Image: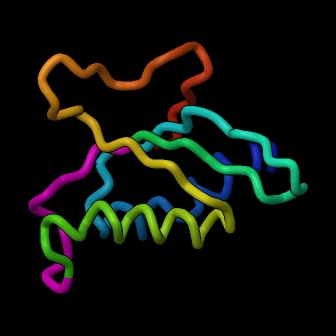
């Protein structure tokens, strides 16, 4: 899947993702796979914990968002939640980082 296609698909689902509590979403990269069409997509999100739907517990919000992103993209998603809470850890940044919303 091309970067432009990923950005377009994710932007088309912005309202739905915001309802799940996604404040910001960035595309970090696409990892190729030996099997065509089965690449993995690396994303960074900032979650609003107060906007998680009542049916989703706080700790399950991350999994719900990651699963929905996988469904939307029809690809394996590796998701980093920002800000990184571990002491000394830094968020994944780089020149290939693309803002989705």
- The residue lying at 59 percent from left, 61 percent from top is 12
Q: Which residues are magenta?
A: 45-55
- The residue lying at 55 percent from left, 33 percent from top is 28
Q: Where's the C terminus, which quadrant?
A: top left
Q: Give x and y (percent) for residue 44.
A: 42, 40
Residue 25 versus residue 87 in the image, above or below: below
Number of numbered markers: 0
Q: Nearer the viewer, residue 31 or 98?
A: 31
Q: Give x and y (percent) for residue 92.
A: 42, 24
Residue 95 versus residue 70 in the image, above or below: above
Residue 82 versus residue 33 in the image, above or below: above
Q: Nearer the viewer, residue 64 or 16?
A: 64
- The residue lying at 56 percent from left, 54 percent from top is 11
81 displayed left or right of 69: left
Asked if residue 94 lies in the magenta stretch, the reply is: no
Q: Nearer the viewer, residue 83 or 12?
A: 83
Residue 97 picture quarter:
top right
Q: Nearer the viewer, residue 35 or 22?
A: 35
């Amino acid at each position: 899947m091309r970067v432009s296609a990923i950005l377009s698909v994710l932007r088309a689902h912005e309202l739905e993702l915001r309802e799940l509590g996604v404040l910001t979403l960035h595309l970090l990269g696409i990892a190729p796979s030996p099997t065509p069409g089965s690449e993995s997509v690396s994303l960074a999100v900032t979650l609003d914990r107060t906007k998680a739907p009542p049916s989703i517990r706080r700790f399950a919000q991350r999994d719900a968002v990651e699963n929905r992103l996988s469904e939307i993209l029809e690809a394996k998603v590796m998701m980093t939640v920002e800000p990184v809470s571990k002491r000394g850890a830094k968020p994944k940044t780089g020149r290939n980082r693309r803002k989705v919303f």
